[in-house]
Image (cartoon, rainbow, N blue to C red):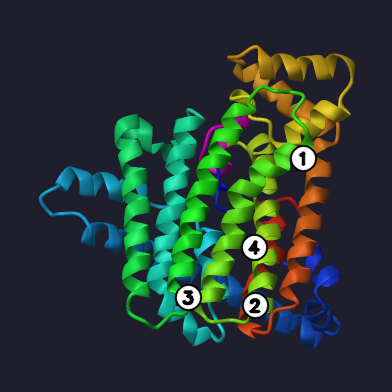
């Protein structure tokens, strides 16, 4: 599904900045320019966090405005689903795909909140399908309530998100409203297809890399790409810029998904707020696991296949399998692949005309590995 673990961003400078964007390279050429670069990065991070706080508040208001005060239990339940999320990349990307100047950000704030509702719904379904017990350091929604209520919550979130888009686009201030609603429906279709394929390919240790990339493309890749398209279309940007932003979103989304797959294997629940090695436990064939199956030999490979195909691995099995994945070099290789996607995202972004879009979206790409502690 779509990147169930939003990144924790620290705003640190990554190697990508000096290697991949000419504008960043220029800023690194003197002490004065380095200070300027640091200032730009700090501003982007502050903007990211401030806007997410606004998005969280607005998304809660949207939910409460759409539910009757008489349904007190339902309102409490829905607010639990939106409580204390880690800052998410999705509304930020949408927002700056829709901007020509910084002031434009305010015109799409309710739409960004709707994007947050849409992405938050995927977190609940991910936890159901992965039998996860924790999310954001507290009980997963279906554990706090139950699976039936969790399904209802996801449907309500998606319904309120679409209603919000419909209401905002009906005001007449945005371009291409019908096309954007069509793309939003495609996002949901692709996310459900991603979930299906993720389950269908579970424990199939011979899964090809091309099929894996199709799965994650249906998830975060197309999700981010189509969010960028929606933002650009709403702003009336030219076709060439829509294509560039869509390419940026796809490549950034692929990198985000891959880094989340890495984090699932190498970081503990205190850091992630969710269960350790959920992909291994559920035999989901993610990139670190697929590469480890190809890079390992002998007993290590037999053990990985045993963990993935025999069901019910112990905590000790999961720790050992995670160590094998790291020892054979799969994590390092995944990180290199994520870097390549980030490089492509920045090349696509260089074709956009809006300086505010370039600056803020470049910050997303150049800070991702640092945010995931992978730089």
Q: Total marks drawn?
A: 4
| Horizontal side, residue 221 vs residue 335: left or right | left
Considering only order in the chain, which callout, 4 or 2, is on the residue closer to the N terminus? 2
Q: What residue is pinned by disc 3?
A: 176
Q: Element at badge 1?
A: helix
In the image, what residue occupies the spot 69% across and 52% down? Answer: 254
Q: Nearer the viewer, mark 2 or mark 4?
A: 2
Give the labeled residue for mark 4. Answer: 249
Q: Residue 223: horizontal and vertical position, in percent? A: 57, 55
Q: Is residue 272 left or right of residue 157?
A: right
Give the CA distance from mark 4 to mark 1.
20 Å
Whole-number angstrom distance, CA of label 3 to CA of label 1: 34 Å
User: Nearer the observer, disc 4 or disc 3?
Assistant: 3
Position of the C terminus, as image quadrant, is bottom right
- Residue carrying label 2: 239
Determine the image quadrant of residue 224. bottom right
* Dot 4: element: helix
Which mark is first along the chain, 2 or 3?
Answer: 3
Q: Residues within 10 Å of mark 3 (few under 14, many from 20)?
A: some
Give above or below for 321 relative to 359. Answer: above
Which is more foreground, mark 4 or mark 1? 1
Q: CA distance from mark 3 to mark 2?
A: 12 Å
> Could you say which is closer to the camera, residue 77 or residue 249?
249
Q: In this rendering, does residue 314 appear at all?
A: yes
Residue 370 as seen in the image, left or right of residue 177: right
Tell which circle, 4 or 1, labels the residue nearer the N-terminal end. 1
Task: Look at mark 1 in the image and give the residue it sits on.
Answer: 210
Q: Nearer the viewer, mark 3 or mark 1?
A: 3
Q: Residue at x 18, y 43 (%)?
A: 73
The foreground one among 226 and 78 is: 226
């Amino acid at each position: 599904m779509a990147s169930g673990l939003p990144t924790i961003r620290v705003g640190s400078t990554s190697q990508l900045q000096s290697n991949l964007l000419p504008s960043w390279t220029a800023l690194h050429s003197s002490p004065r320019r380095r200070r300027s670069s640091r200032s730009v990065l700090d501003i982007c991070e502050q903007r990211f966090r401030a806007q997410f706080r606004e998005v969280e508040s607005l998304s809660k208001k949207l939910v409460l405005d759409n539910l009757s005060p008489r349904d007190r239990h339902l309102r409490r339940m829905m607010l639990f689903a939106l409580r204390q999320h880690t800052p998410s990349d999705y509304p930020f990307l949408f927002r700056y795909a829709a901007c020509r100047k910084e002031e434009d950000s305010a015109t799409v704030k309710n739409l960004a909140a709707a994007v947050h509702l849409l992405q938050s719904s995927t977190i609940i379904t991910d936890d159901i399908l992965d039998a996860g017990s924790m999310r954001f350091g507290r009980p997963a929604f279906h554990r706090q309530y139950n699976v039936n209520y969790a399904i209802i919550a996801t449907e309500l979130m998606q319904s309120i998100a679409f209603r919000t888009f419909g209401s905002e686009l009906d005001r007449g201030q945005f371009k291409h409203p019908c096309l954007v609603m069509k793309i939003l429906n495609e996002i949901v279709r692709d996310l459900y297809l991603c979930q299906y394929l993720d389950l269908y390919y579970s424990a199939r240790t011979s899964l090809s890399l091309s099929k894996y990339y199709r799965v994650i493309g249906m998830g975060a890749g197309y999700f981010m790409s189509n969010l960028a398209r929606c933002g650009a279309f709403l702003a009336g940007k030219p076709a060439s810029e829509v294509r560039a932003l869509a390419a940026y979103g796809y490549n950034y989304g692929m990198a985000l998904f891959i880094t989340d797959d890495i984090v699932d294997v190498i970081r503990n629940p205190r850091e992630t707020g969710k269960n350790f090695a959920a992909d291994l436990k559920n035999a989901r064939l993610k990139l670190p696991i697929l590469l480890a199956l190809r890079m390992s030999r002998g007993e290590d490979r037999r053990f990985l296949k045993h963990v993935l195909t025999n069901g019910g691995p112990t905590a000790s099995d999961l720790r050992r399998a995670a160590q094998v994945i790291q020892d054979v070099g799969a994590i390092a290789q995944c990180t290199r692949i994520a870097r390549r996607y980030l490089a492509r995202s920045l090349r696509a972004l260089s074709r956009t005309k809006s300086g505010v879009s370039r600056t803020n979206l470049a910050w997303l790409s150049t800070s991702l590995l640092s945010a995931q502690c992978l730089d």
